Amino acid sequence: MYYLLQENTNILVKLTAKVNAWWDAFVLKLPNLAVAILVIVFAYFLGKFLSKLLLKILRKKMKNRSVRRVLSKILYGIILVIGFFLALGILDLDKALTSVLAGAGVVALAIGLALQGTLSNTFSGIMLSFLPRIKIGDFIETDEHSGFVHDISLRNLVLRRPDNHYVIMPNSKFIEEPFVNYSLVKRGRVTVHSRVAYGSDLRTIKTMVLKEFEDKFPKQIDEKIEFYYIKFNDSSIDFMVRFWIDYVKKSQMYTAQDEAILLINDLFHENNITIPFPTHHINVKEDIENQPKNLNHGDD
């Protein structure tokens, strides 16, 4: 019993000594801990300040808002990481940091394999932010959606559709699949189709339409207004007119098509030119001789 009490007493003494040593080490490290906390806090506010300052500078130098935002976020993250490493150095945790980084590499590999889609969207977002082919405010069209680019984040691209609804799409879709950007150039070509009746003076109609379109839709250098008869249809001869307008979004195309259709309709109405519509004739022959006769089988 005496030996058991003596052993327990020795364990308690050793434990007390260990706790006292930890406490002494903690007290000795308190100034370093306070400085490390101050470094992290300072890095946080410094990152906020410098990222906002960078945004202000980039607004004067760069038009692409998404690129400005990504650059400011990268600067903010770099400053936070530097502050974190400085804090670990102040706490003399360099060896622990090496172990943590080694373990973090293995964990990062596992997370990367598990989140391939998410990481793909993130890198796609960075690429989209630096691509000159797409920027905030552009009108773009994919296979399923169209609208104005409202925002480009590290994971998603937000489209504002013409009906004012928002579509959130993964960034990888714009890297891997084709899309149309109507805002890359200021001029675009619009096509309108119509028809005339058989027997119409086709050459005169072509000359009239071209003259009206040249007056209504002025062309620039290397542009021309084109008129083509394209098809002998069942009840008409079809044609199309192609002309150029200032065109960076689809609403401008619809407006130009509307004006062109009204122009053709008014021109044809003034000159008594018929715009035919499909008709079908059904001929029914009535053969009286072959019709069955009504026979009375009753008594006369």
Image (tube, helix red, strand yellow):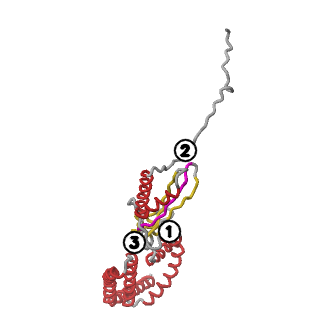
Magenta span dominant secondary structure: strand
In the rendered image, the residue lying farthest to the top is 300
Whether residues under marks 3 and 1 lie with C-beta atoms below 8 angstroms apart, the answer is no
Examine the rendered structure and indicate whether residue 178 appears above or below residue 204: below
Q: Which residue is mark 3?
A: 136
- Tell us which disc is closer to us: 2 or 1: 2
* Badge number at residue 179: 1
Of label 3 and label 1, which has the lower sequence position? Answer: 3
Image quadrant assignment for residue 216: bottom left
Residue 187 visible within the image: yes
285 horizontally vs 223: left or right:
right
Between 244 and 48, the one lying in front of the other is 244
If you read the primary sequence from the N terminus, does the residue marked by circle 3 or circle 2 appear first?
3
The amino acid type found where label 1 is placed reads Phe
Q: Disc 3 and disc 1: Cα gap in Å?
A: 15 Å
**What amino acid is labelled 3 in the image?**
Ile
- The residue singled out by tag 2 in the image is 279
Q: The disc labelled 2 sits on which kind of residue?
A: Thr
Location of the N terminus by quadrant is: bottom left
Q: Which residues are magenta?
A: 235-248
Q: Are marks 2 and 1 in contact (CB under 8 Å)?
A: no
Residue at the (48%, 72%) spot, across then down = 121
Q: Secondary structure at mark 1?
A: loop
Q: In the shown orientation, is residue 292 left or right of residue 98?
A: right
Q: Nearer the viewer, residue 30 or 283?
A: 283
